[in-house]
Image: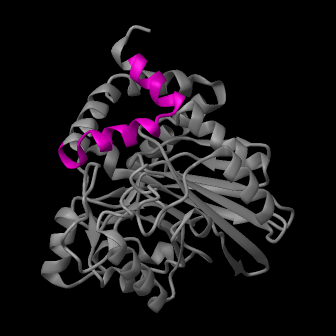
Amino acid sequence: MAVGDMLFCCDLGERLRGSGDYDYPFYKIKNFLKKADFLYGNLETMITAKRQPEKYAGAGIYYSDPPVGQALARAHFKAVNLAHNHMYDFGAEAVESTIQLLSEVGVMYHGVGSDFSFARQPLEFDVKDFRIGMLGYCSASVSTDKKHKYVTCPIKSSIIKRDVSNLVKRVDFAIVTLHEGACNYPSPQHRHWSKVAVDAGAKLVISHHSHVISGIEEYNGAVIAYGLGDFVGTFEGKESREAFILDCLLKSDGTIEYEAVPIWINYGFQPEVAVGEKKREISDYIESLSEKLRTGESDKEYWAQMKKSYFRAAFADTMRLVRGEGIVGVIRKLKKLRWHHIQLLFKSVFRKS
């Protein structure tokens, strides 16, 4: 089973610190999670006692308290992704603390290292009769900046193709995670990267970052889930409270059967398996998003959503860079621009295009 983004911070973090009960987020769903032979999620906050953030050029600075590691283990998690845009919020000390605390409780991790070659090393493990391998990549420049002591590996087609091609020689199932996405619809580039991974041999591609549900696509015998939504978090709004668990059955013939299990985060910040009308509503929404992937309409929907907000977000991010690092930071950001970003900027200015 795979779940989406987990953030033990903000209002939820205050509640956990006040009560000392770090198992609290899982009370409503722990019995369901125990059904998994292997449970995986994206740990979007580093586990640290440090409270002084690094000099940071992005929005939002999040952390989890040290007891979160033990809570993840008690909730049946076997591994987490660390290749995300908040990996370096509190610097090298927080990365080292997270690695140590997860290792102490037996929760595996992947996606971070002292350089790109280490960050892209696969996590390999056995589940029953299968050998599984996982690779993780991140699109956020703040976490792929080589000046940091620890980095995540950037999302590049050439790297993904090479890594997956090598991994499939050693495992029965190769899984790729991409920390990428900004709305309910994957960008054309996001879809391309996912299919590059499948064409190289991956059987499952899981994305996270947008904090909302995206559709599921079947491609060349593989499963691509573009966004599972939040699993643990304190974001307000209906979209941020609805998500799903990707429940996969790996079969001996190399195929995967899967079910998107609807969940919602209740008003006490606890994920629950959805039932009744709420279950039907979320299931129908996942299917509608997936249908647009099949028809190609999702690309059009992506541009429609993003052109309304990209220019505003890009301007705010640039102002943060100017305040934090001056013109040097802006130049560094410009060097990381891709054609996809230029397209978004153009469509943000000329909204009728």
Viewer-proximal residue among 332 and 155: 332
- State the quadrant of the C terminus: top left
Residue 244: in sight, yes or no?
Answer: yes
Residue extending furthest left? 18
Q: Residue at x 50, y 45 (%)?
A: 283
Q: Position of residue 342 (x, y in %)?
A: 46, 25
Closer to the camera in the image, 339 or 147 = 147
Task: Look at the image and say whether residue 275 sits in the magenta stretch.
Answer: no
The answer to if 330 sits in the magenta stretch is yes
Q: Nearer the viewer, residue 46 or 132?
A: 46
> Quick one: which residue is furthest to the bottom in this view?
104
Type of secondary structure dominating the magenta stretch? helix
Q: What residue occupies the far front of the structure in this picture?
A: 328
What's the residue at 25%, 53% (across, down)?
60
Q: In the rendered view, would you say 346 is above or below 247?
A: above
Percent x, y of residue 168: 80, 63
**Is there any visible trace of residue 27 in the rendered image?**
no
Quarter occupied by the N terminus: bottom right
Q: Is residue 280 left or right of residue 174?
A: left
Looking at the image, residue 15 sits to the left or right of residue 343; the answer is: left
- In the rendering, at what x and y percent does residue 218 appear? 70, 43
Q: Is residue 49 above or below residue 1?
A: below
Residue 21 to residue 38: above or below: below
What residue is rendered at 64% in x and 25% in y? 295
Magenta residues span: 323-347
